[in-house]
Image: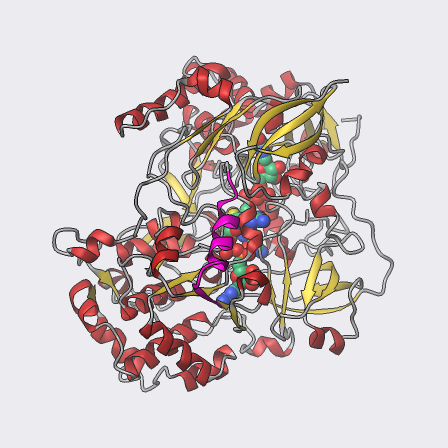
Amino acid sequence: MTVTAIPHSSHWGAFDALVEDGRVIGVRPFAGDRFPGTLIESVPDIVHSPARIDRPYVRRGWLRGARSGARRGGEGFVPVSWDEAIRLVAGEIDRVRREHGNAAIFGGSYGWSSAGRFHHARTQLQRMLNAAGGFTGQVTNYSYAAGMTLMPHIVGTNDCIQGPATDWPAILANAKLMVCFGGLPLKNGEVCAGGAGEGQYRRWLREAAASPLRVVNISPLREDTPEWLRAEWLPIRPGTDTALMLALAHAIVAAGKEDRAFLATHCVGWERLRAYIMGEADGVAKTPEWAAPITGIDAGTIRALAAEMAASPTMITAAWSIQRQDRGEQPYWMTVALAAITGGIGRPGTGFAFGYGSINGVGNPRLDLPVPQLSAGRNPTGLWIPVARITDMLENPGGVCEYNGRRIVYPDIRLIYWAGGNPFHHHQDLNRLLRAWARAETIIVHEPWWTALARHADIVLPATTTLERNDIGASSRDRHVMAMKKAVPAQGLARDDFTICADIADALGVRAVFTEQRDEAAWLRHLYDEARTTWTRAGIETPDFDEFWEQGFVELPAPERPFVLFEDFRNDPRKNPLHTPSGKVELVSETIGGFGYDDCPAHPVWMEPKEWLGAPLARRFPLHLLSFQPATRLHGQLDQGRVSLSSKVAGREPILIGPQDAAARGLATGDVVRVFNDRGACLAGVVVREGILPGVVAMATGAWFDPLVPGQPGALCVHGNPNVLTRDEGTSRLGQGPVAQSCLVEIERWTGDLPPVRVHAPPSIVEAR
Ligand SMILES: Nc1nc2c(c(=O)[nH]1)N[C@H]1C(S)=C(S)[C@@H](COP(=O)(O)OP(=O)(O)OC[C@H]3O[C@@H](n4cnc5c(=O)[nH]c(N)nc54)[C@H](O)[C@@H]3O)O[C@H]1N2
Ligand SMILES: Nc1nc2c(c(=O)[nH]1)N[C@H]1C(S)=C(S)[C@@H](COP(=O)(O)OP(=O)(O)OC[C@H]3O[C@@H](n4cnc5c(=O)[nH]c(N)nc54)[C@H](O)[C@@H]3O)O[C@H]1N2
Ligand SMILES: [Mo]
């Protein structure tokens, strides 16, 4: 048998799929990638996984009429034909829109889907639902909802989060110090939404290590910077970054080192914020001595760092994680304030930007050019909720959600439709979600695999993986546009999301609106040509579609000079004002103050999180659980692949714990523990690790939710999904972001029989209806 190499791409990197006899047997990194990652090694396992959904299925209870109020997740699935499945789905969309209106269809469908920009499941689904009259959608995201809602008020843009950010060449050439709240963890550079032709993150961290730049890693985990970066580690109690930032600001101001000129000419509200920092406003001076017992970092260390920040060109960055917390707006606002106080904003390589350590491609030098992208079109209902309020919405039809100065009335959802995301991965407090989930009459899901989402659905439609179709991969953070060529035939009876949606649109009489009379090949050419027109307009010559497809990729040119965020504003704030009400950096925001939210007042403040090591609840649950991004997969994706599986401990998701906390509980590496709080419990496998702040434990997200009693809220997750433990509440009424990182737990040795992990195999399939 001959092995053929077929170019492809994914969120976890570009590669050639090695195909033999219709099966993917291996991968090799894209030849142009000088810094390839390791997650691609799991690709063969997931394409041919036993967890693939082989055909359409319907939950037996649903067929028998057990709908609203029915517990999902514990029943067998009945195989059906594609014709019947399409008829049932179209029938439900039509029934619900006629009986309850399109707002009763929840099509938010949050999630990463896959890298191809045409077969992007969420976009395909939303195009189809839009053609059918619309749906209730979701805004913001789980990554940085609080930050992205706040920043437009403060600096008039989200570029400091979503990019382009001040690039690495500018940092390396100009900054002497990089202060990283949440560190620069190597693991997070394994992925890039839409895929990347190169592991740029690994490259820039290596260059930083070889440069004189001094990096300070402010994090509960030492491994949040790789050892070879030789960063200074300041272990901080989770959830207390705002207090540390206020103390740094206090020390700088007390030493008379704040950049008064910048604060006067480029900012509004400094006098008021200063009065708060110095204690004139509330009688509490935010000194290093004040912050020391809150943060766990001693006052001398804080003062020394403040002096260094005031004296040398400094880039301040915060990981997205530090706003995925109770009152997560505050550390982000205070990051901007610190950068204003040190005066680095708009100067080469200094100031602030978020997420250098959060994902591959932040700070990657790149011209700001669009890439091929399918549009979901316009949603005729115009209705949406903040993404992380899904359980609230399901629990509370007609209820009101305050968000960013608006009042949003929750619709009465009858039909939930999801393609390309997994709420049983991404949402907090899964037991609460599971109860609310029962309120829907019908839940429809497209999935390639029997994830927890598919198991908790009524109608399950098998989707292809990207390896079974042609597509184009591209990201706004990378310069490569990649051909993703079909490598193997569709597995089982799987169909791609475009074909599924086209057939449903057909049954609803809107096929042509949905497809615009293009098939896959015509769409790929069309999307490429659209992007290419903008490249040509920018004076950039690129191959035509046929040449691109033949070549397998296009590499857009790199910019000629380093990019510096807010440079024009810095140089001339009158001519180039920010898009804020004042045109300046808003250290005090009258707009936000006008909302009257006590959980997000008019300037950054320290508020104790509801769950942190200083909370009364810490007496019962003395460990702060960080549920961070997994090194071994992308969220729930690739969990059934070799890279993820080889990291499990006794088949469970690892939990990192320091030697002291382990010894206090008589635990050693390899033990299985029960991690619990009042919201739920899961099993995990102990890994004792140096370099973790006492009182903190860490567990990656993404182990597929595997309740001991499927369908029963509160059941033990035997595999280790931390979202049975996390809290489901908004960061504040401003951002309504998720607060996964604010979570207290206790752990104890698991002494019972070890229940098997069953979630990587199909659920029970029943023939009888
Ligand atoms: N506790 C805790 N929870 C968190 C976080 C945290 O830090 N802590 N982080 C949050 C963050 S930042 C995020 S972004 C979310 C991520 O949450 P999600 O994006 O929902 O997670 P994924 O596992 O990537 O879900 C994508 C799903 O799409 C499916 N899929 C892939 N390709 C296709 C396709 O072609 N067609 C179809 N139909 N389906 C496809 C995959 O099988 C997978 O189930 O999680 C959030 N949840
Ligand atoms: N390999 C891999 N990479 C990924 C992903 C993945 O699934 N796998 N997901 C991607 C996605 S969708 C996103 S949104 C980004 C998320 O990017 P981030 O939010 O930056 O990622 P996390 O790993 O959640 O957090 C980074 C580090 O912050 C530290 N931290 C947590 N809480 C605190 C705190 O209160 N204070 C301080 N100072 N530090 C704290 C943790 O130790 C953690 O390792 O990652 C992306 N990168
Ligand atoms: Mo994310």
Q: Identify the residue at horizontal 64%, vertical 57% (top origin).
A: 722
Give how far across and how far down residue 583 sits, in percent.
Answer: 18, 56
Q: Give, as a single range, the part of the protein colored magenta.
A: 198-216
Closest to the observer, 231 or 320: 231
Closest to the observer, 76 or 312: 312
Please say whether residue 461 is one of the residues in the magenta stretch.
no
Q: Identify the residue at horizontal 40%, vertical 23% (top origin).
A: 527
Q: Identify the residue at horizontal 29%, vertical 64% (top origin).
A: 344
Closest to the observer, 275 or 475: 475
In the rendered view, would you say 85 is above or below 228? above
From the viewer's perspective, tell me whether residue 588 is left or right of residue 122.
left
Give how far across and how far down residue 137 sits, in percent.
Answer: 43, 39
Image quarter for residue 590? bottom left
Farthest-out residue, right: 753
Give how far across and how far down residue 644 sits, in percent.
Answer: 70, 47
Give how far across and how far down residue 405 sits, in percent.
Answer: 30, 55
Please count the marks in the image: 0
Q: Identify the residue at horizontal 43%, vertical 12% (top origin).
A: 517
Say if residue 682 shows up in the picture. yes
Quadrant the N terminus occupies: top right
Please say whether residue 208 is one of the residues in the magenta stretch.
yes
Say if residue 395 shows up in the picture. no
* Colour scheme of the picture: secondary structure
In the rendered view, would you say 69 is above or below 419? below
Quadrant the C terminus occupies: top right
Farthest-out residue, left: 574
